[in-house]
Image (tube, grey):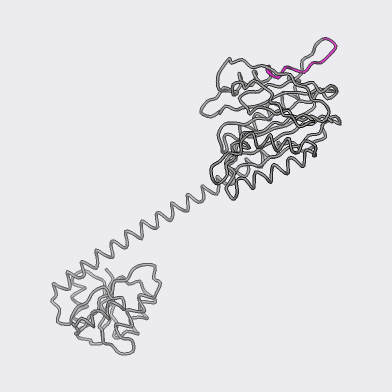
Amino acid sequence: MRILIADDASDAREILRRLLKRWGHEVVTASNGREAWEILERESIRLIISDWMMPEIDGLELCRRVRSAQWGHYVYFILLTARDDKEDLIEGMTAGADDFLTKSFNFEELRVRLRAAERILDLESALAERNRKLGDMNSELQTALDRIQNDLRAAAALQASLLPKDPNVSAMLAVDWLFLPATEIGGDIFDFFSLNGHHIGFYHLDVAGHGVPSAMMSVTLSRTLSAALSDGHLIVPAGDEVRVRSPDAVVADLNRRFQSSDTSPYFTMVYGYIDVTSGLGKLCQAGHPYPLLTRRDGRIEQVGHGGFAVGMLEGVPYDSVAFTLEPGDRLILYSDGITDCRNPAGESFDLARLERLASDFQESPLGALAARLDATLRDWRGTGEIEDDISLLMIERR
């Protein structure tokens, strides 16, 4: 161990230096406190044996300076003194001394005290090494967390890029929506599109779970349905006419294709279409919350038969339900992120509040209803984070 001896008595300093070297220690000496301090500023010392009474800077002041310095490691300090009363002991301990030796010390007593000092310094070194390793681990974890956060932001951006951009899909329909993504990205996604000259298709789906797998699954489903639209798989040639494919057949195909596994979660959805000229439509509900038909007079009806989530079970039946949108009527599709949204007391927003809000805003533009629902849900949950995606798709026949 590297030890600094600070003593203005040259004979005592030399005796102590030789003794310590004989015991295998590396020794540095100083003839007073100032010289000792200068050595400490430029060299790494772990243990100091210092006389109390020295010119310029005494042992007590040297000890105080050592304790106030930022060395990056602990320095064990032994005061060497002729004083042995309780007041001196208290004063030295207050200054930061770890141990005391009277000048009439026994050599074996010194050796025992040095061994105690070595145990403490070894423990400090072990703790410092452990803290260093923990610091390295924390740095690696932070790097991994930053990478995950970047991945989540990228996934959220990709998911958002697939949401509708232009509501003007038909002069006969008004379309609007609301999307509030959860803090941890989820699996909500929706869209509407032209199937042929007078039919508009739509879907709203929610992939089970949260995080990147659910978000990527929703992206995959969006692209799958877009590809099916581009390839003509959502319409059926019938002689000289082109008929829209039945919603239950579209959902059944998705169920066959996306059977859930450890890497492919199941999802709920509503898929359907509307004839913009007549207002006649069909939809298939697959485990998703019941679509709402809000009539022009404020009445609200639920549409659908429940159904099984897609990808959960093979070969389950799906059916299509017919509905009619009269001018001024609205079809509202929503995720359970709305009805399950909890306030600070743990109470769910529930379907009744959504229906009441939809009825109150029946004569207002769709955008006003979306904005009011947004504000209402933000007030409802308070400062809490969104636990699940909140999404709403509204279609009104003009």
Magenta range is 239-249
Q: Position of residue 138 (x, y in %)?
A: 45, 53
**Pick the front one: 100 or 87:** 87
Count the marks.
0
Quadrant position of residue 106: bottom left
* In this picture, residue 132 sits left or right of residue 82: right
Quadrant occupied by the C terminus: top right
Whether residue 137 appears in magenta in the rendering, the answer is no
Residue 223 image-quadrant placement: top right
- Vertical placement of residue 181 versus 31, above or below: above
**Can residue 91 be seen at all in this image of the molecule?**
yes
Q: Position of residue 318 (x, y in %)?
A: 64, 17
Task: Provide residue 315's location: percent of width, then percent of height.
Answer: 58, 14
State left or right for residue 73 relative to residue 363.
left
Residue 180 screen position, x and y as percent: 66, 42
Q: Quadrant of residue 91?
A: bottom left
**Position of 98 compared to 332: left or right?**
left
Q: Nearer the viewer, residue 83 or 386?
A: 386
Q: Is residue 379 above or below residue 311?
A: below
Residue farthest to the bottom?
A: 55
Residue 215 visible: no
